Amino acid sequence: MATRSKPTIPRPLSTTEGFLLGGVAACVAVTFSNPAEVAKTRLQLQGELVKGGGEKVYRNVFDVFAKTWRNEGIRGIQRGLPAAYAYQILLNGSRLGFYEPIRRSTNQLVGLSAEEQSAATSVCAGMASGAVGAVLGNPLFLVKARMQAYSPALPVGTQHYYKSSWDALKTIYRRERFRGLVRGVDAAILRTSMGSSVQLPTYNWTKNQLVSRGVLPAHSIWTYLASSSVSGVCVLVMMQPADTALTRMYNQPTTQLANGKTVGKLYKNPLDCLWKTITTEGPLALYKGSTAHFLRIAPHTIITLTANDIIIGLYKRLRRGTVA
């Protein structure tokens, strides 16, 4: 009598595999979302610490697109893209690659099944994986923000000119050493933890609800798009004030004290930045560039999470040798 072989259980992705695949998905996304990031950065710096917001160089996000294209061309629209690629590999590689291992470990630590989707452990895993990515990617986010703020035609905020991302890293290190490369890391952790705390939990929850209620099939592109859209809106609501603080912390001018320590001229820390922004420009200043942020974060989240699911599925099929 022939014995029936047991079906093989697919091996879960390793942390390294998840990190690399997540990084690739994020790089696909940032190619499309970077122009909106440039607009967001410039709008957040416009009228910085000026009572009433000062004179506006840019009226809105679409005015930024038009003026940047007219004065700087494609180079201006995609300013900071190489640094953005490297940053996305580190940030979203960590955020997407470390999320599941951390969530599973946290579940087991509190006595839950590794597969169970708990809101509390999912949020904790999102915050932890995001914080890791923020620390690793901080020097590149710093460079990216400064390069995106730079405009030879219509400057806003402090202007930092660098020939390339590598030149920026070398220049910052030569002037400020390691401390310069980690400038703003506290704001980066705050921003990314707030965004990451809801990005994957809301994506997975929405996806599970759509599938379990029979609204959409599990592997439909519409399921990925709908889940990513909900996730993107949640990330925007959570992250915008901290994102404004981070942009300003990164881009502020610096000065060297008598003891040789280099410090920011405008802000001591993220809370100081938030307080000065509110008291000088009003609370709505925290939401400068929010339309641009939405135009950046919605497609970025949709493409990143959709591409991540598609890339992981393709990779698993390649690993099993079932791709036609």
Image (spheres, helix red, strand yellow):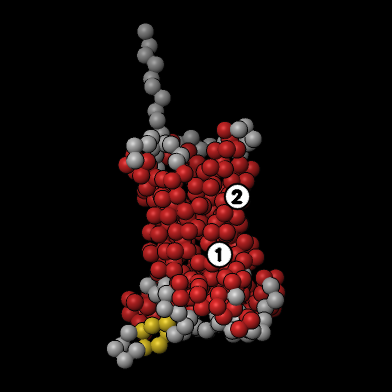
* Residue 55: x %, y % from top left: 66, 84
The location of residue 232, given as percent across then percent down, is: 58, 54
Q: Camera-side residue: 293 or 13?
A: 293
| First-in-chain label (1 vs 2) | 2
Per the image, label 2 sits on a secondary structure element best described as helix
Q: Extreme front residue here?
A: 279
**Which corner quadrant of the image does residue 257 belong to?**
bottom left
Callout 2, which amino acid?
Val
5 lies above or below 316: above
Residue extending farthest to the bottom is 258
For label 1, the SS is helix
Residue at 70% from the left image edge and 76% from the top image edge = 59
Q: Residues within 10 Å of mark 1 (few under 14, many from 20)?
A: many
Residue 240's label in the rendered image is 1
Whether residue 186 is visible here, answered yes or no, is yes
Seen from the viewer's position, the closer of residues 129 and 3 is 129
Observer able to see residue 78? no
Find residue 124 and name its label: none
Q: Where's residue 154, x and y in %?
A: 63, 84
Q: Quadrant of residue 298?
A: bottom right
Which residue does the image show at 59% across and 46% down from the upper left?
Answer: 227
**The N terminus: image quadrant:** top left
Amino acid type at mark 1: Gln
Residue that numbered label 2 is attached to: 230
